[in-house]
Image (cartoon, helix red, strand yellow):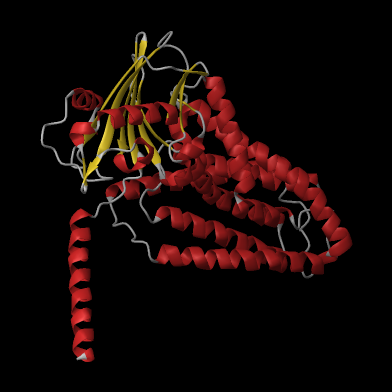
Amino acid sequence: MRLRRLRFAAWCLLALAATWAQIARGHEFKLDALINTFVKIDPGEAQLVVRVPLYLFKSAKFPVNNVEIDVDKSAPAIERALAAIQQDVTLFENDQPLVASHATGRLSLPSDRSFGSYEQAVSHVSAPLEPGTSIYIDQGYVDAWITYPISSPGSVFAIRTTADQELGDYLKVALRYMPSGEESRAMVITSSSGTVPLNPSWARAAAAFVGLGITHILTGYDHLLFLLCLVIPLRGWRQILSVVTIFTLAHSFTLLGSAFNVAPSGAWFPPFVETAIAASIVYMALENIMGVDLKRRVLITGLFGLVHGFGFSYGLRENFQFAGTHLLVSLFAFNVGIEIGQILVLVVMLPALAVVQRYVLQGRVGMIILSAIVADTGWHWMIDRAEVLWKTRWPQPSLTGFAILALWVAGILLAAGGISAILKRLRLASSPALPSPERGSAD
């Protein structure tokens, strides 16, 4: 009898679990983690049209009926949701927060696709929800249309979002900015983006991208390690200046080319560049161990500098959306920021390296030990990145790909000619070799 009861209880639990699974499967949904937004500037007014996932409005406390939103009684909750949107998404005019003069909102089904354009979104928000519409709890959207009075459409506008900051960069705001008399621009921001200018002045854009370039080089540990490899065996300011100058010119060349979309595209290229950057560190470190010829080092530095320029371009592409109409200014400002950051690194690195080589790792043995440590780090980076590259699908040959390849080959040949001219100008071809296994160090 006890065994029968246990069997009966087990079957009941199994049936209950199966029934619950069917209910959960019928009501499962995917969190969007995306807020769609339009900002349109009209004479005298700024329009904010926004679609926010319903699950973000826990504090609005929408009334429910079983597993559905009680649409007929949701008007007060929609008003609370509109207030929350105005608190979490702030528009600025000339650094002053705007105050809304009018706001309207509605609930929408998760299947609604009316936010494909600004006109469709405005028309949709203006229309009432159809009677009898069923919206499950935490599914669907709250759509809002908010109007702000402004002083002038020519002002500098900005936006900031603080929606669900605990989600961090996981919650994104996909924004379409539509200035008066200009083409619209798209960008993606998060709560960690801070206050983002929508139409920055050239000076503000330049300052922002200079800071971005400095930050990018100071946090690019593989670039810094490569720079360390370059200067470990160098003696005298002429040698250091020549190698660093070539590296700067080379990575500037590919950075500019990538910004104008003439770099190879596809999922394979970023891991290829990252792997090549790690390989450049390994090569330079091994060359330091085997012995360095200055003329060869300058040429190899130029080739690897081209690769590092592609790496720098990824930091630029992610933030080019914030340049407004000043794309060229922002591009050069970013490059200037990289060079400033590089100078700051060298100002700290060279004296520290001199102290280490004089008091800790002396002579050629010290240089070998230091380069071996760098080579080991670069080797592990290279293996890890090569594994990612190996799993990436490579592109099929195409006329466009061959055209881009031919363009870069021509550019590299041109750069090589420029490097040769610099070598002759600085008379580096006749410069004494750097420390090698057979020779001592030369000043």
* Quadrant location of the N terminus in the rendered image: bottom left
When asked about the image quadrant of residue 10, the answer is: bottom left
Indicate left or right for 259 with 250 as reference. left
User: In the rendered image, is residue 211 in sight?
Assistant: yes
User: In the rendered image, is residue 420 in sight?
Assistant: no
When asked about the image quadrant of residue 152, the answer is: top left
Nearest the camera: 114 or 276?
114
User: Residue at position x 18%, y 88% from top?
Assistant: 4
Nearest the camera: 432 or 368?
368
Indicate left or right for 426 with 28 as reference. right
State whether residue 97 is above or below residue 359.
Answer: above
Residue furthest to the front in view is: 1
User: Residue at position x 57%, y 36% from top?
Assistant: 212
Nearest the camera: 228 or 63?
63
Residue 319 in the image: x percent, y percent? 47, 37
Indicate left or right for 68 with 321 as reference. left
Residue 428 in the image: x percent, y percent? 72, 48
User: Residue at position x 50%, y 36% from top?
Assistant: 193
State whether residue 300 is above or below residue 365.
Answer: above
Nearest the camera: 176 or 363?
176
User: Residue at position x 38%, y 38% from top?
Assistant: 59
Residue 317 in the image: x percent, y percent? 45, 40
Count of labels in the image: 0
Residue 351 in the image: x percent, y percent? 82, 49
